[in-house]
């Protein structure tokens, strides 16, 4: 008799417009914006409305874990079930109900995630007494916030709580409340549209239909331990997908601006990421450099009169959008044009004629 094995249960897929999730994700994107090419223009318009002192405070509070920026994900992980139905007063009450020690623990978890061989929270607390080791760890996780400032944030959970709540309150009342109401109809339309679609039972196909992209490696790694995926529309992520994992639920923020405007209107989701990636002079120069060959990042930097971080941001966007293939080799990454993806883009544009 052949052996029997029970396959994994299919993922539960949901769509939701959520004020708490959108608020936290938007603040995170505003602070992360300088690190990424190609985020939505609307995000930059919103970012430019934030007073300088508030922007500085938000980014210090949210980006201290380094380039991985996990503190907003940790705050999202503490949202209760049914958070999608919260208005702002209820969200504020939830943030107030959390104890200071919870904020401290979330800060330490944020510092311990997203990096190879991270230290657990208990060991990170011990590092505070050894400033040199503390500074070395923060350098390893690529934190731009001075070590002494990060120490102040994580050693006093009650003070961290008060600062986070005050900054989010001010952002909501001064900046985000009218923006959320202005974008809510577009987000709700996107949710209604996707709820009406008969998406494939295969998550990879569903993800492609919604985002126009293949599943990113990090998301793919998380899927085996997930039982539910909730897609939350965003007007700011552009060709990217932001995510947060909450126990066995994966929260994915996708670009709702690519949702068809109505029945019978062609879905341009798959066209948006590669077109966004091509709509830049520098990225077109990179594409010309890679014509018919493979190059590693430093070779591209040497050919262009721009900085290495800028080239990395351009390459990251082009790889994210599927324009480029990436082949790791030791510490280097080699880039080449994804010819098949470009051919599909041409076919998609031709279909509009």
Image (cartoon, rainbow, N blue to C red):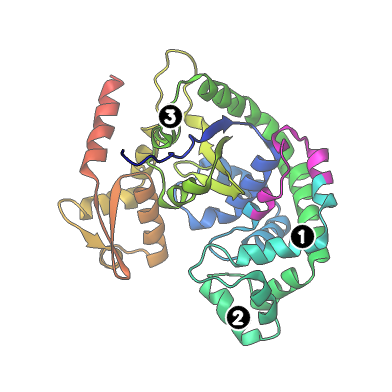
Outermost left residue:
292
Q: Badge 2, how many Cα within 10 Å: few under 14, some, many 20+?
A: some
- Answer with the quarter of the image where residue 21 lies: top right
Identify the disc placed on residue 201.
3
In percent of width and height, residue 238 lies at 48, 41
Looking at the rendered image, the quarter that the C terminus falls into is top left
Q: Of 185 and 82, which appears nearest the observer?
A: 82
Spatial CA span between label 3 and label 2: 47 Å
Spatial CA span between label 2 and label 1: 24 Å
| Label 3 residue SS | loop
Q: Is residue 307 visible?
A: no
Q: Is residue 146 above or below residue 349?
A: below
- Answer with the quarter of the image where residue 322 lies: top left
The magenta segment is: 74-93
Spatial CA span between label 3 and label 1: 37 Å
- Answer with the quarter of the image where residue 83 lies: top right
Q: Earlier in the sequence, mark 3 or mark 2?
A: 2
Query: Which residue is labeled 2 in the image?
Result: 135
Q: Badge 3, how many Cα within 10 Å: few under 14, some, many 20+?
A: few
| Badge 3 vs badge 1, beta-carbon distance below 8 Å | no
In percent of width and height, residue 91 lies at 78, 42
Left or right relative to 71: residue 173: right
| Label 2 residue SS | helix
Q: Is residue 76 magenta?
A: yes
In percent of width and height, residue 281 lies at 33, 48
Identify the residue at horizontal 21%, vertical 43% (top origin): 339
Q: Is residue 63 visible?
A: yes
Q: Of 67 and 288, which appears nearest the observer?
A: 67
């Amino acid at each position: 008799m052949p052996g029997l094995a029970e396959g994994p249960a299919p993922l539960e897929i949901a769509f939701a417009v959520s004020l708490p999730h959108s608020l936290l994700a938007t603040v995170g994107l505003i602070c992360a914006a300088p690190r990424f090419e190609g985020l939505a223009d609307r995000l930059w318009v919103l970012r430019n409305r934030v007073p300088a002192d508030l922007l500085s405070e938000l980014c210090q509070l949210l980006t201290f874990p380094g380039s991985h920026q996990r503190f907003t994900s940790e705050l999202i992980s503490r949202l209760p079930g049914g958070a999608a139905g919260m208005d702002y007063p209820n969200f504020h009450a939830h943030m107030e109900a959390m104890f200071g020690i919870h904020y401290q623990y979330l800060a330490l978890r944020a510092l311990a995630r997203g990096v190879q061989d991270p230290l657990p929270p208990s060991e990170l607390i011990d590092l505070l007494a050894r400033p040199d080791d503390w500074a070395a760890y923060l350098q390893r996780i690529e934190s731009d916030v001075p070590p002494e400032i990060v120490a102040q944030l994580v050693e006093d959970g009650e003070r961290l709580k008060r600062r986070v709540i005050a900054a989010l309150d001010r952002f909501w009342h001064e900046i985000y409340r009218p923006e959320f109401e202005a974008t809510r109809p577009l987000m709700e339309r996107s949710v209604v549209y996707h709820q009406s679609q008969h998406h494939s039972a295969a998550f990879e196909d569903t993800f492609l239909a919604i985002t126009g992209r293949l599943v990113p490696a990090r998301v793919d790694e998380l899927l085996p331990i997930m039982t539910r995926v909730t897609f939350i529309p965003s007007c700011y992520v552009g060709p990217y997908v932001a995510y947060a994992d909450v126990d066995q639920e994966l929260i994915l923020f996708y670009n709702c601006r690519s949702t068809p405007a109505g029945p019978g209107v062609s879905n341009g989701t798959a066209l948006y990421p590669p077109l966004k990636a091509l709509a830049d002079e520098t990225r077109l120069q990179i594409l010309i450099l890679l014509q018919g060959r493979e190059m590693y990042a430093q070779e591209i930097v040497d050919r262009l009169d721009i900085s290495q971080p800028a080239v990395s941001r351009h390459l990251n966007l082009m790889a994210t959008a599927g324009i480029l293939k990436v082949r790791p080799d030791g510490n280097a990454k080699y880039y080449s044009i994804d010819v098949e993806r470009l051919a599909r883009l041409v076919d998609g544009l031709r279909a509009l004629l």
